[in-house]
Amino acid sequence: MKFTLKKLDLEKSLGNLSKASQLKSDALVITSYQLADTKKKKLSGLVAAFDETLGGVITDLVNDENFKFKTGETTSVRLSGSERAAFALGPIKKVILVGLGEEEEFDKKAERKVAASILRKAKSEKITSLAVDSFGDIGLLVETLGLVNYEFTKYKSSDDKDDKKQLSEITILSSSVTAKEKEAVAKSEIIIDSVNKARDLVWEPACVVNPTYLAKEAKKIKGTGITVKVMEKAQCEKLGMGAYLAVAQAGGQPPKFIEMSYKPKGKIKKHIAIVGKGVTFDSGGLSLKPSKAMEMMKEDMSGSAATIGLMNAIAKLQPAGIQVTGIIAATENMPSASAYKPGDVITAMNGKTIEVNNTDAEGRLTLADAVAYVSQKNPDEIIDIATLTGACMVALGNTCAGIMTNNQDLLDLVKAVADEQGENMWQLPLYDEYKEKLKSTIADLINAGSGGQAGAQNGGLFIQEFVGNKGTTKKPIPWLHIDIAGPCWLDDASDWSPKGASGIPVRTLLNYILSV
Ligand code: BES
Ligand code: MN
Ligand code: ZN
């Protein structure tokens, strides 16, 4: 999608636009706040100006069809040849009317809803280029239009794609095009690109996205201060990553331990480590999943996809003073004659021993070594993103991530950003009582010991065992665990995403990092 900002005060210049400022799009979006519930519903501003030239068509829609300009309410009016001439807008054939809802209630959430409905209306009407008279926050408008426009059509043959009818250009009209607005649009384009990168990786099937592919994608991230390092199995063995390598030992695709690092020039205020679960296919291993549960397990690398998307945005936006390390312990989880077995005892790189009672609780094993590894770099915070438990979906549903922490301040800060971004997250506790369930009779820990109770917490508590202490203190590094098993894949479209891979929580973590 190509976005252009165009300086144009439509209301002032309607009907006498110079040739140069005429629009090149085939449809125009104009908006209005909700009309008062009185008998005489009065149109105002641009909408009133259009209504006049259109001989009262919009007034008719309001009176006869009860069109009220509620939040995200849309309708369209096709222009006749003479009407087009009267407006002098250029090739505009259609005017799409969109409601902003009550003025006092118009916030970011409402703006997203409006932008999403504009995009969907334009698509349903097969519009290929669109002009939008700007409203609200231009950055958020562009971001939402771009995020909602996403489609993964790579494997559809061209007939299906209807590719002649793709919406490919959006021009945002604004009476003042400031440097700040231009910058906001450029930033939104980076965000769209990064979230959509994460979505592509999740959509791609596991026959394409394997650990090697993830490593290649990570290496594509370029920018000042960015370095990407990939460790092979032998190096991980030397480091003692027995938990991660146990998952990888079935011998399918070779594992890749990926480390992306961003170091800004100058003084570093904070070092944030991001760890993304990168199980490129989770069959369950010998504790094999039933077919239905396995069907979507290509999505089990959504945490790593978000980490790559996030590092891509960091590379382009170059935040000052913040060091960011992104870690992915990528592997498949497969059954085979060499696969790890229930009952095996393995040792993670921090020396803790683990009894494996269920090879399907593999994510926490890969994360154990990834978190222990990154702890050695002594970051100020560790945030892990993982499609960790079906239990989290049972607790919070399909549209909400579960968040757990050893540091309430960190959780509160990230949660506030998530709320603002519309990426639902809800805190689950990590009660000491449940730590008992992590105990094994043969080893230090058992990987799936809670017997189905408090499953999301059990996963969180397990990972917590591998968070190191800050420096030489006895205090653990502040850590946040984001279980995205539910919202990594949306069954229904939202105000910021189509159905399918959502790209959560790229925007939350990016905006959190930019706010530090
Ligand atoms: N990758 C799954 C969790 C998952 C389930 C992600 C559904 C996305 C959608 C994870 O590795 C897993 O299998 N977890 C087990 C843990 C159990 C064995 C303790 C689960 O949730 O059943
Ligand atoms: Mn599993
Ligand atoms: Zn898994």
Image: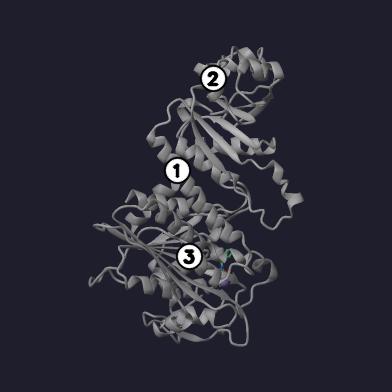
Residue at the (57%, 26%) spot, across then down:
30
Three-letter residue code for mark 1: Ala
Q: Nearer the viewer, residue 182 or 138?
A: 182
Residue at the (59%, 87%) spot, across then down:
338
Mark 3 / mark 2, whichever is N-terminal: 2
Q: Nearer the viewer, residue 353 or 143?
A: 143
* Gap in angstroms between the C-alphas marked 3 and 2: 48 Å
- Label 3 sits on a secondary structure element that is helix
Residue 476 screen position, x and y as percent: 30, 68
- Label 2 sits on a secondary structure element that is loop
Q: Quadrant of residue 32?
A: top right
Q: Which mark is residue 186?
A: 1
Residue 175 screen position, x and y as percent: 45, 25
Q: Which mark is residue 18?
A: 2
Residue 92 screen position, x and y as percent: 64, 26
Q: Which residue is mark 3?
A: 218
Question: Along the horizontal axis of the image, is 112 left or right of 371?
Answer: right
Q: Which residue occupies the extreme front position in the image?
A: 20
Mark 1 / mark 2, whichever is N-terminal: 2
- Label 1 sits on a secondary structure element that is helix
Vertical side of 374 occupied by 397: above or below: above
Q: Nearer the viewer, residue 165 or 142?
A: 165
Q: Quadrant of the N terminus?
A: top right
Q: Residues within 10 Å of mark 1 (few under 14, many from 20)?
A: some
Three-letter residue code for mark 2: Ser
Residue at the (46%, 40%) spot, across then down:
185
Vertical side of 469 occupied by 51: above or below: above
Mark 3 / mark 1, whichever is N-terminal: 1
